[in-house]
Image: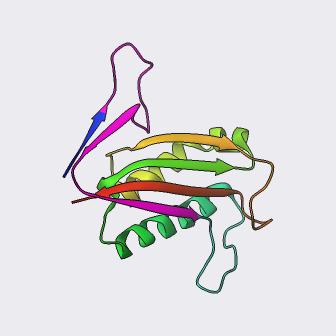
Amino acid sequence: MSLERVNPAGLSPATGFSHAVTATGGRLVLLAGQTALDGDGKIVGRTLPAQFERALGNLLAALAAAGGGPHELARVTVYTTDVADYRAHAAELGAVWRRLAGRDYPAMAVIGVVRLWDEEALVELDGIAVLP
């Protein structure tokens, strides 16, 4: 199995994401949306960066349980209730991503939403991974 990150020269520079990811061979893992829920089902963290860190950790925990790691993420979608707040914390969120998931960025999108399932949730991440 192999993943190839594709970032064409004619597109704006990919910073913190890849424009495309191709996968050859392997097993597809579809990861459900993860928020900052703790083991008791309660949202933890009051700020977007704190919730992002927990949500990403939860996503990676689900991926690990399926037998994969961050480098096998092909696609991640981030849903946030405040895109301006997300942009304001982009550097901090990038640092969290690199610390937890490394520098192999999947294809990504950030989408603004009115609210998430849990009213206290500020961010949710879902993803697709390809495992060997």
Q: Left or right? Give the position of 47 relative to 72.
A: right
Q: Quadrant of residue 41?
A: bottom right
Q: Is residue 17 above or below residue 41?
A: above
- Residue located 45% across and 50% down the image: 95
x, y percent for residue 43: 69, 73
x, y percent for residue 48: 66, 55
- Residue located 48% across and 49% down the image: 76
Q: Count the marks.
A: 0
- Residue located 48% across and 46% down the image: 94
Q: Is residue 125 above or below residue 75?
A: below
Q: Looking at the image, which is closer to me, 14 or 23?
A: 23
Q: Left or right? Give the position of 74 relative to 91.
A: left
- Residue located 43% across and 38% down the image: 17
x, y percent for residue 75: 43, 47
Q: Which residues are magenta?
A: 6-33
In the picture, the quarter occupied by the C terminus is bottom left
Q: How is the image coloured?
A: rainbow
Q: Quadrant of residue 99?
A: bottom left
Q: Is residue 17 above or below residue 117?
A: above
Q: Is residue 14 above or below residue 12?
A: below
Q: Looking at the image, which is closer to me, 128 or 103?
A: 128
Say if the magenta span includes residue 18: yes
Outermost residue, bottom side: 40
x, y percent for residue 23: 27, 44
Outermost residue, top side: 10
Q: Quadrant of residue 87?
A: top right
Say if the magenta span includes residue 62: no
